[in-house]
Amino acid sequence: MKTYRIAVIPGDGIGKEVVPAAIKVLDQAALLDGRFQFEWTIFPWGCEYYLETGKMMPDNGIELLKQYDQIFLGAVGMPNLVPDHVSLWGLLIKIRRELQQFINVRPAKLLQGLPSPLRQPNDFDFIVVRENSEGEYAESGGRIHSGQDEVAIQNAVFTRKGTERAMRYAFELAKTRNGHVTSATKSNGITYSMPFWDEVFTQVGKEYEEVGQASNHIDTLAAFLVMKPENFDVIVASNLFGDILTDLGGAIMGSIGIAPAANLNIEGLYPSMFEPVHGSAPDIAGQGIANPIGQIWTGKMMLDFLGYQDVGTRILNAIEQTLARGIKTPDLGGAATLQEVTDAIIDYLT
Ligand code: NAD
Ligand code: IPM
Ligand code: MN
């Protein structure tokens, strides 16, 4: 039997609640399947670790992670105690960059059994391919002067390599789906990066003539995702635009608490990292009412990535059955606890 060694970073807040829940579901799915098993190694890194040691992870943290097949992460952030730019850049973003997880794949689809908050939701099923290493999140800029003259400068960096890589991933993904890519741009207002983004989209698009292609400004695209999300298949977006669109994707499904994500090292050189779209939700942490579906669906994405799409499908079916029976956490308007939702998903696994 194949054993996958997974590095687990529950992180902070509800990460510590939803990760153990998802591990239970994944273990049960593996047991039922019988071809493989997981060996989980927990790394207690995050804000509490920082408050004790002054670091979000040990100095050899990245080297340790490289020894595992994949990484399963909950969420990072205790903004009342540790500034977000310290905690996120010391752990989550550090891992994404140092392990070259250039592509962040974030699906959103209308689930059976879960009404969307949209007024007239047609069946939507789209995937945002988010450039995950540069763009607006570049570590470039500074603060100069002081007082009334103070200026903060943040440079967005778009490399040809990084932009082409994201576009190509999106086109290849579209070939396996409904065959359409929409580029999220803002070349009407942003003068260097976005015209370049458009140019690269057109150039790479020429290699994929069989794939439908469109470009929408990000403001319009955000509106279209609310008004007619069924029109989209694959959306390729810069780091910041992709970040924003994917909380929106979660919201139109019903809650950001169910939105999954995968940070992929597409060359297979280092582990990829599977972590949901949502954060540590300090407002509900410790109450046992966090929605575990985002983390569980993220586990399904890890199974897909490992080549067990059939097992992944079974997990999504069990999620839909649970929702269809009204077993929902409060973010979805229900009264069930995290434990009850997790137990139901395990019961419905076949
Ligand atoms: P958040 O996603 O943590 O929470 C936003 C809202 O959604 C909150 O009302 C929260 O209760 C709700 N929510 C989120 N996930 C939920 C779930 N699974 N079940 C039920 N409700 C859920 O975003 P935020 O409040 O902007 O950020 C809180 C902290 O998390 C910050 O420190 C932020 O930087 C961090 N963060 C981390 C990640 C990550 O590690 N991947 C992602 C986003 C935000
Ligand atoms: C996400 C999060 C992170 C991001 C933050 C916490 C840095 O919002 O994974 O969507 O912007 O990438
Ligand atoms: Mn986000």
Image (spheres, rainbow, N blue to C red):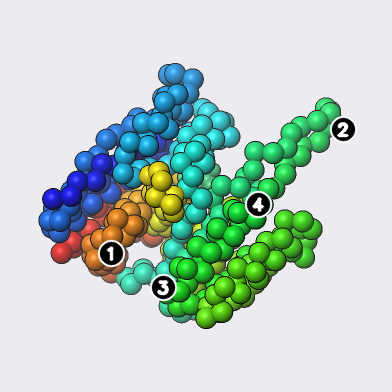
> Would you say the residues marked 3 and 4 are in contact, meaning their CB atoms lie under 8 Å apart?
no
Marks 3 and 2, how far apart at CA: 52 Å
Q: In front: 100, or 90?
A: 100
In this rendering, the answer to whether 120 lies above or below 190 is below
Marks 3 and 4, how far apart at CA: 26 Å
Counting residues from the start of the chain, the first of labels 2 and 1 encountered is: 2
x, y percentage for residue 318? 24, 64
Marks 4 and 1, how far apart at CA: 33 Å
Asked which secondary structure carries label 2, the reply is helix
Instruction: In the rendered structure, find residue 149 and report the number of the disc placed on it.
Output: 2
* Three-letter code, disc 4: Thr
Instruction: In the rendered structure, find residue 159 and report the number of the disc placed on it.
Output: 4
Marks 3 and 1, how far apart at CA: 14 Å
* Three-letter code, disc 1: Gln
> Would you say the residues marked 3 and 1 are in contact, meaning their CB atoms lie under 8 Å apart?
no
Instruction: In the rendered structure, find residue 309 and report the number of the disc placed on it.
Output: 1
Does ligand 2 reach within 8 Å of label 2's beta carbon? no
> Would you say the residues marked 2 and 1 are in contact, meaning their CB atoms lie under 8 Å apart?
no
Q: Residues within 10 Å of mark 2 (few under 14, many from 20)?
A: few
Residue beneath the point at 39% across and 50% down: 268
Marks 2 and 4, how far apart at CA: 31 Å
Counting residues from the start of the chain, the first of labels 4 and 1 encountered is: 4
Q: Indicate the quadrant where residue 201 lies.
A: bottom right
* Three-letter code, disc 2: Asp
Counting residues from the start of the chain, the first of labels 2 and 4 encountered is: 2
Q: Which residue is mark 3?
A: 176
In this rendering, the answer to whether 48 lies above or below 32 is above
For the question of whether residue 76 can be seen, the reply is: yes
Q: In front: 88, or 238?
A: 238
